[in-house]
Image: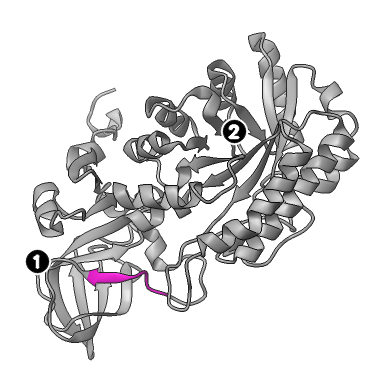
Amino acid sequence: MQGLPVSELAQRFGTPLYLYDGDAVRDQYLGLRDRLHPVVEIFYSLKANPNISVCALLHRLGARAEVSSMAELVTALEAGVPADQIMFLGPGKSEQEITACLKEDIRAIICESIDELAAIDRLAADLGTRARVVLRVNPSFTVKGSGLTMGGKPRQFGIDEQALFDAEDLPGRHARTDLIGVQAYMGTRILSEEAVAENTRRILDMAERLAERQGFPLDLVDVGGGLGVAYFAQEQDLDVDRLADLVNPIFEEFHRRRPDTRVVMELGRYLVATGGVYVSAVRYVKESMGERFAITDGGTNHHMAAVGIGSFAKRNFPMRLLNRAGGPAAKWNVTGPLCTPNDTLGKGVELADDLRPGDLIGVERSGAYGPTASPVLFLSHGYPAEVLVVDGDAQLVRRRDETEHLTGPQLLHGALTGQR
């Protein structure tokens, strides 16, 4: 990674660990930023990887921040993202989170229900301030081409499109709230340039109609994002040039009609997935009933995505031997240290036939939805180390959980110790 041998990094920081390549993240961001219409602002979705250094890196490149929890809000602020470049979304925001957004005066709260809109309005009144709100719409339409469709069916996300068009005088009923825009998120892991363009066109059209119907200024439209990366065989990464050729005319036409409206695209997985690799060390190798097993020190407790959650069939993330060339290829089941047969990082993975203890196996394209989307406390193994390489300099950006980190928060009931 940037000329640094992974074996040396593994020795220095230990395994298992996540390695993030800052150059790869930069190239992914700028590769899209340089091609997209300049009216589009890119917001980094911290849910994909909320590490503060990853957020700071992307912000230094020009990205804003989209957050979904109090911790993510604090992370973005501490990473240097100005409050007016932060948006907060999520279907179940607490009053504490809404209050923090109002006190920090972030760019916008993305509202996902009529009840939530009333709560935001009430809390703004309590604080003697005004709330800037973007309405998240659950559209009536859906566009094929995403790994997980977010619109066109009953969802906990957003307010149904028809309900918003049927509602009477939303601005007038919420005196402390400034409705400033519309957001719709149609799906995730989209690998079709045509689907992205169709989503964009329809969201922009819906936003204009809704703003006119409810009588609020359309200061901002968030067209979602959901751009995917290829993980599995027969998948292909998006062609960024073709994507730009399809969406830029749509943005240009909208910009000509509404030159003062900000356009937002929120991206998480697309920006960071390809820049990460999950590194685990082989502890033991064995054969069972004709199949080879490589048992490593890292498992699905750190990388739940590798299990294939949401898929009907188990499909392997790209994996390779990192510390040496190895012999001819052979099929291996790569498993972790957990006491469950589900702890399988890869099944029938082609790796060197002479795989041995001490070898390092890398699960590639692992920069998004890694440890924070995994049951890291399962069997009390804890959080892995995270390392970011920037300009050839590798630094620890999250410490590994040690035993005291896991046992320290637990409290022994006094009745069990003879104390009250």
Q: Secondary structure at mark 1?
A: loop
In percent of width and height, residue 73 lies at 47, 30
The dominant secondary structure in magenta is loop
Residue at image position (38%, 59%) is 304
Mark 1, mark 2: which one is toward the viewer? 1
Q: Is residue 398 visible?
A: no
> Where 405 sits versus 323, above or below?
above
Residue at image position (58%, 60%) is 243
- The circle on residue 93 is 2
Query: Please, what is the three-letter code of the amino acid marked with disc 2?
Result: Lys
Question: Relative to 24, is 180 on the left or the right?
Answer: right
Label 1 crowd (10 A; few <14 / some 14-19 / many >=20): some
* Residue designated by label 1: 358
- The quadrant holding residue 150 is bottom right
CB of mark 1 within 8 Å of CB of mark 2?
no
Q: CA–CA distance between discs 1 and 2? A: 45 Å
Q: Nearer the viewer, residue 250 or 384?
A: 250
Q: Which residues are magenta?
A: 315-320
Looking at this rendering, what residue extends furthest in the bottom direction?
A: 290
Label 2 crowd (10 A; few <14 / some 14-19 / many >=20): some
Question: Relative to 249, is 359 on the left or the right?
Answer: left
* Colour scheme shown: one colour
In percent of width and height, residue 208 lies at 81, 41
In percent of width and height, residue 387 lies at 23, 45
In percent of width and height, residue 63 lies at 47, 38
> Where 59 sits versus 78, above or below?
below
Number of labels in the image equals 2
Which circle's residue, 1 or 2, is located before the other in the chain? 2
Q: Is residue 240 visible?
A: yes
Q: Secondary structure at mark 2?
A: loop
Residue at image position (68%, 47%) is 251
